[in-house]
Image (tube, helix red, strand yellow):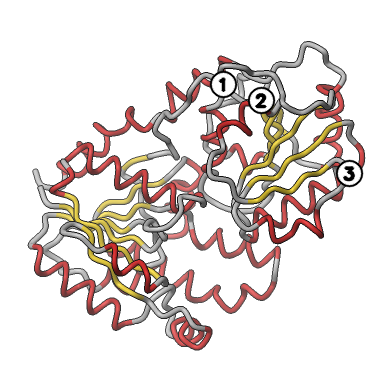
Amino acid sequence: MKIVYVVTAEILGPQNSGGVQYSTRNITVLRQAFGEDNIYVCAITKHKEYLAKKNANTEIFYSNRSKVSILKNTLQGRLQFDRNVEDSVIEYIATLKCDTVIFDSSRMGYLQERLPKEIPGILFMLNIEKDYIAAFIKTNPIYLVLKRAFELSEAMAVKNADTIVALNNRDALQLDRYYGKKADLILPITMDDIYVKPNDTKLTSSSTKLQLLFVGSRFAANEHSVKWFINKVMPHVDAELTVIGNGFEKLTSKLQRHNVKIIGRVDDLSQYYHEANAIVSPIRVGSGMKVKTTEALMYGKPMFATDEALEGYEVDDIKSIYRCNSAQDFISEISEQSKNESAISFDPNIRQRFLEKYNTVRYISSVKSLIEGQHK
């Protein structure tokens, strides 16, 4: 079976954002299910230098992302690329004579509508974009200019999808509510298990304070949440926070405090996870699921996290995952653990939950059955 995967996430660059990791995971699952030679990737990128990464199974399409181009596309109801890119992608797909085309988000409605009707189209929904853009507008009204394009693109994508994959039950319910369509498969955020047990779990820090860790790249929702947490929570707890994530190094002068260390991008996260007592995830807006929650589960880390950060994860029965939805919630729970001399830094129950529910290998057969079912 020959499958084309169309992706707008920058999978050819660093794996430093949740969207990129999600798309890369999907491609990995497809290659494991159907073989690498049967998966063809159409990667739409804003980086001209990535054009050199083209190979036999990866075709790369450049999309001009200048402010003028973005404005023009938005006024047309398009996101991330224009009609010329659509033409090129459709022409390439036609040369492959493929069995199925998969779109990795509902931001490509115009392109999806142009897919020849005889080719089954599968939509992997990273978010319910109608909710996603609404949440971003709450953090910054400037995103209002994108609202129509997000909503129009998603409506077209859903309408033209033969099969839909959602991340969680919340998204599936919203899909039905907004568009009257059911999700054919719930495929949560997962990861390949790369956990390696540390030789020494002792903190390298000389501090006796509770060591908290935030991991996430700097985009609007994360930046908004980190600033809120630093200003509203950290002045009131006996703990130290380290912030890891691509782009946050640019905010060091604004965010660093006596008990807050801003590091930004790093090449290897494992040591930071091993050294932390707990993860904080104060994400308060968004849609879909949070990739970094899966990563924290993989490392078996206790968490102080909002409902939004835990959305879609089956963790209510795990005692060392603390739900916190206000500054006072975070302050109370962190303060309690700061005083707890028996507080753990690794919970085998959390890691076991990852292995049972969020390890990628467990979903390969489900994806394969879904796609093969289209052709019976």
Is 83 left, or right, of 318 in this rendering? left
What type is the residue that disc 2 sits on?
Pro
Which residue is at the front of the view, 277 or 361? 277
Q: Are marks 2 and 1 in contact (CB under 8 Å)?
A: yes
| Residue at mark 1 | 350
* Residue at 51%, 51% in the rendered image: 16
* Residue at 15%, 42% in the rendered image: 372
Residue 260 vertical position relative to residue 239 in the rendered view, above or below: below
Question: Distance between the Cα atoms at labels 3 and 2?
Answer: 24 Å
> At numbered mark 3, what does the secondary structure look like: helix, strand or loop?
loop
Residue 283: give x, y in percent of width and height: 67, 47
Q: Check the image and name the residue furthest to the right.
A: 236
What type is the residue that disc 1 sits on?
Ile
Residue 319: give x, y in percent of width and height: 67, 18
Position of the C terminus by quadrant: top left
Neighbours of disc 2 within 10 Å: few (<14), some (14-19), many (20+): many
Compare marks 3 and 2 and give the one earlier in the sequence. Answer: 3
| Residue at mark 3 | 258
Which residue is at the front of the view, 6 or 62? 62
